[in-house]
Image (spheres, rainbow, N blue to C red):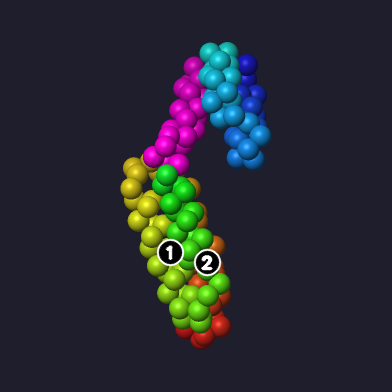
Amino acid sequence: MQYDEFLARYKSAQRGWRLGAVDAQEALAALRGVVPEIDDARLRQTAAFLIERWAAQLSPEVRERRERAQRIAAAAELDEGDARERIARLEQGIRGITAVSRETDDESEQNAVLALNEPLAQLANSWRADVGD
C-alpha cells in the first residue's frame, strides 16, 4: 500500500469521526491493520504516529480539557453587557483558554485548544473598533 492511500483513509476516518458518522475506535483499529502494508518503513512509522496521536486525543483527560475550553469560549461570547464589558469577558475567555492549553505538553492538543481563541480575539477587536480603543 502506498502511504498516500493510507493518508486518504486516515483523513476520511477523522472527518467522519468529527461529523459523528464514524466510531473512532473502529476506525483506529482498521487503520492499525493496514499500517504493516505500507511500502516504506519510514512512512509506516509516520502512519503509526498519526494513529497514536489521534488515539491520544480520545482520552478522557483530553476530552475534558477541550470541553472545558469550549465552555469558556461559549461564556466569553455571551451577548450581554456594554462593549467594554464584552471586551473584558472576551479577554478573560482568551486567558482561560490559554491556561487550559498549558495543562498539556502535547503541541497538537495545545494548538487545537488555542484555536478557540481566534474567534474571541476577532470579536474583541471588533468591539474595540466600535468603542474607539
Q: Please indicate whether residue 10 sits to the left or right of residue 43 in the image.
A: right
Q: Is residue 101 visible?
A: yes
User: On the image, numbered disc 1 is attached to which residue?
Assistant: 93
| Residue 64 colored in magenta in the image | no
User: On the image, numbered disc 2 is attached to which residue?
Assistant: 77
* Separation of marks 2 and 1 at Cα, in angstroms: 8 Å
Q: Please indicate whether residue 52 sits to the left or right of residue 79 in the image.
A: left
* Between 16 and 33, the one nearer to me in the picture: 16
Main SS, magenta region, reads: helix
Q: Amino acid at mark 1?
A: Gly
Q: Please indicate whether residue 8 sits to the left or right of residue 124 in the image.
A: right
Q: Amino acid at mark 2?
A: Glu
Horizontal and vertical percent position of residue 52: 45, 28
> Dot 1: few (<14), some (14–19), or many (≥20) neighbours within 10 Å?
many
Which residue sits furthest front?
80
Q: Is residue 4 visible?
A: no
Going from N to C along the chain, the mark reached first, 2 or 1, is: 2
